[in-house]
């Protein structure tokens, strides 16, 4: 999809253009490429110089001030400079805002406190005009008049980002989907209904209630050109900095190239639509976690039309508490992520509380009918209860006690929570080489051989020659892994985020340059565990991974555990068996504790 997107914007003369039109097109491309773009890029460069020269000039301040123990032992001058850098990047425009947000996830390169400061970056971009929005949407709907597309359209954007802004609207009936038509069969036979009934008995399944309300994302005008100019300027600076001794380990030109790939993915909204379709297919047989329906036929480079995610941001539950649902929400989020990582190799790469919504639903009823039955999922036959529940909750925001009381009431009324993931423009899918590196590293850690894991990380990093003290790095990895091994049966108390943070700190200190996709997976684990533990302090990542490992053990194909064992790789099998043993030992310990607590071992007669 990305290659097709690149070919589409390549400045070439189509073969079918002939005569004077071809000459005129050639002149236009020459003037635009050789004159207009260089001049515009030069002016953009001067603008950036004005913004960032003060940042460079104030760098000596990082050595001033007292060290703040609660801020990663950084000096107060350093913390001020980080904040000044963030404010300057906000003024520099969309590419630099996205660069800062990307840098916030690369704690393998940059200091942790700098990453924390970068994570607060937000866009101050003004909203583009409603006239431009309407023109772009009309073009996406093949020239239909704007009034014939929507029953309702909120003219004030729901949000304005660095590269796009989002509106809420209600499509006219002829444009709405009659349900999950991309996933649900027109008829279900007896075996399909039996399988669905079993799923519903084991775990409540949400009723799919289609909505005619949509979210419409529209790119800002000329944002592609501005980003391309900024990327060219970044590439020049990266090449200059890379020539400085001791800086080559950062491989800045490669990082700029990777960042450019990320930006190009976000500048074609059809890619986000395609990602939604892929996620929906992968999650169609799974419960609760869900993705909005994309209207792919009306999505273009500049416009994305998708089902409106009716819900409350997960951030509200982190702030006010999850009440009776906190463990369920944490488990659902972690289960969805582990499926993405271990089963699908297709991971949402921008998982933060703002991109996860929580809605409530009534579980489906068991289907006891015989024979084939046609689905009736049209809006006319469905009642959307989501807004009703949200109206009950909204008045209690920022009042934790009332919020939790209302959640308990909703629980008694029979509603269950459902997670909806949005903003799927960025995904991580490890290629064959990176996936093999990931599995080899996993195997070494599973066998508690941290020393070999350390050497593997060095051998397969981008620049092994630039690594400082490879032997010391490997010994530190061994020490870290042995610390985990010593607490094998108390893994619930181990914060995987702390372990991975230690690994990223060692990677940064010893200049071990890992692949960006690998780091994205690590950062996603950090974010998800942090979110999960905010809701449920007793969250056990390994316990949550056990059902996924069982699924890996029975599914066919290249990821089958049985195939791996036949090929001599028993690392995943060892983890699976170890977790099963730990589960039964923990259950036995809990039973003994219960017997002692309630005097059941030697009861008084």
Image (cartoon, grey):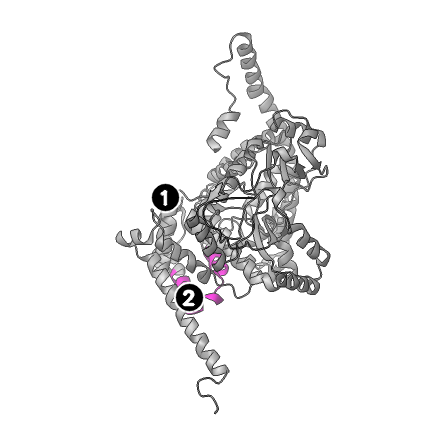
In the image, is residue 429 above or below residue 43? Answer: below
Q: Is disc 1 placed on a helix, strand or loop?
A: helix
Residue under label 2: 483
Q: Which residue is mark 1?
A: 433
- Tag nearer the camera, 2 or 1: 1
The main secondary structure of the magenta stretch is helix
In space, the residues marked 2 and 1 are separated at their CA atoms by 29 Å
Q: Quadrant of residue 164?
A: top right
Using the image, determine if residue 188 lies above or below residue 41: below
Can residue 557 be seen at all in this image of the molecule?
Answer: yes
Q: Earlier in the sequence, mark 2 or mark 1?
A: 1
Rendering coords of residue 154 (x, y %): 71, 38
Q: Quadrant of residue 134?
A: top right
Helix, strand or loop status at disc 2 = helix
- 191 left or right, relative to 214: left
The image shows residue 425, relative to residue 108, as above or below, that is above
Question: How crowded is the residue under tag 2: few (<14 C-alpha within 10 Å), some, or many (20+)?
Answer: few
Residues in magenta, as a range: 478-503
């Amino acid at each position: 999809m990305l290659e097709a997107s690149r070919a589409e914007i390549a400045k070439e003369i189509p073969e079918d253009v002939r005569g004077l039109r071809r000459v005129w097109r050639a002149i236009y491309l020459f003037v635009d490429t050789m004159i207009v773009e260089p001049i515009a890029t030069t002016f953009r460069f001067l603008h950036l110089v004005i913004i960032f020269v003060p940042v460079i000039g104030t760098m000596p301040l990082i050595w001033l001030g007292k060290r703040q123990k609660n801020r990663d032992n950084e000096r107060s001058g350093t913390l001020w400079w980080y904040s000044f850098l963030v404010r300057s990047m906000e003024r520099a425009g969309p590419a630099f805002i996205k660069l800062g947000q990307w840098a916030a996830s690369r704690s393998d390169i940059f200091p942790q406190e700098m990453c924390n400061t970068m994570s607060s970056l937000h866009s101050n971009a003004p909203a583009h005009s409603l006239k431009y929005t309407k023109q772009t949407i009309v073009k996406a709907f093949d020239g239909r008049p704007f009034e014939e597309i929507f029953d309702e359209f909120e003219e004030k954007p729901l949000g304005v980002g660095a590269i796009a802004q989002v509106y809420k609207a209600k499509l006219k009936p002829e444009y709405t989907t009659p349900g999950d038509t991309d996933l649900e069969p027109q008829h279900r036979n007896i075996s399909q209904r039996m399988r669905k009934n079993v799923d519903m008995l084991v775990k409540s399944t949400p009723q799919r209630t289609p909505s005619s309300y949509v979210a419409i994302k529209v790119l800002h005008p000329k944002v592609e050109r501005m980003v391309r100019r900024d990327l060219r300027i970044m590439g020049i600076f990266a090449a200059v900095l890379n020539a400085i001794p001791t800086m080559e380990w950062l491989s800045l030109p490669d990082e700029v190239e990777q960042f450019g790939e990320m930006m190009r993915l976000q500048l074609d909204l059809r890619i986000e639509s395609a990602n939604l379709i892929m996620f929906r297919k992968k999650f169609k047989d799974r419960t609760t976690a869900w993705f909005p329906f994309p209207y792919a036929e009306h999505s273009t480079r500049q416009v994305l039309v998708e089902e409106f995610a009716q819900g409350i941001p997960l951030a509200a539950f982190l702030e006010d508490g999850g009440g009776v649902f906190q463990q369920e929400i944490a488990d659902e989020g972690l289960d969805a992520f582990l499926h993405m990582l271990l089963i699908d190799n297709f991971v949402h790469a921008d998982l933060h509380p703002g991109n996860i919504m929580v809605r409530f639903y009534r579980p489906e009823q068991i289907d006891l009918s015989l024979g084939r039955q046609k689905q009736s999922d049209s809006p006319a036959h469905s009642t959307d209860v989501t807004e009703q529940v949200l109206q009950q909750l909204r008045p209690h925001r920022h009042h934790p006690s009332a919020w939790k009381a209302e959640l308990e009431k909703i629980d008694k009324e029979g509603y269950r929570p459902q997670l909806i993931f949005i903003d799927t423009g960025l995904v991580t899918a490890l290629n064959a080489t990176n996936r093999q590196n990931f599995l080899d590293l996993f195997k070494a850690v599973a066998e508690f051989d941290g020393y070999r894991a350390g050497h593997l990380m060095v051998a397969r990093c981008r620049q092994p020659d630039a690594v400082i003290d490879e032997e010391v790095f490997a010994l530190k990895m061994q020490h870290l892994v042995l610390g985990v091994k010593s607490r094998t049966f108390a893994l619930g108390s181990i914060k995987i985020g702390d372990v991975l943070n230690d690994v990223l700190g060692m990677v940064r200190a010893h200049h071990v340059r890992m692949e960006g996709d690998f780091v994205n997976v690590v950062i996603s684990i950090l974010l998800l565990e942090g979110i999960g533990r905010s809701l449920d302090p007793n969250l056990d990542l390994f316990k949550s991974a056990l059902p996924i490992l069982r699924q890996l053990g029975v599914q066919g194909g290249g990821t089958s555990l049985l195939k791996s064992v036949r090929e001599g790789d028993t690392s995943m099998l060892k983890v699976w068996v170890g977790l099963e043993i730990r589960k039964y030992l923990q259950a036995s310990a809990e039973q003994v504790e219960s017997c002692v607590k309630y005097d059941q071992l030697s009861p008084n007669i």
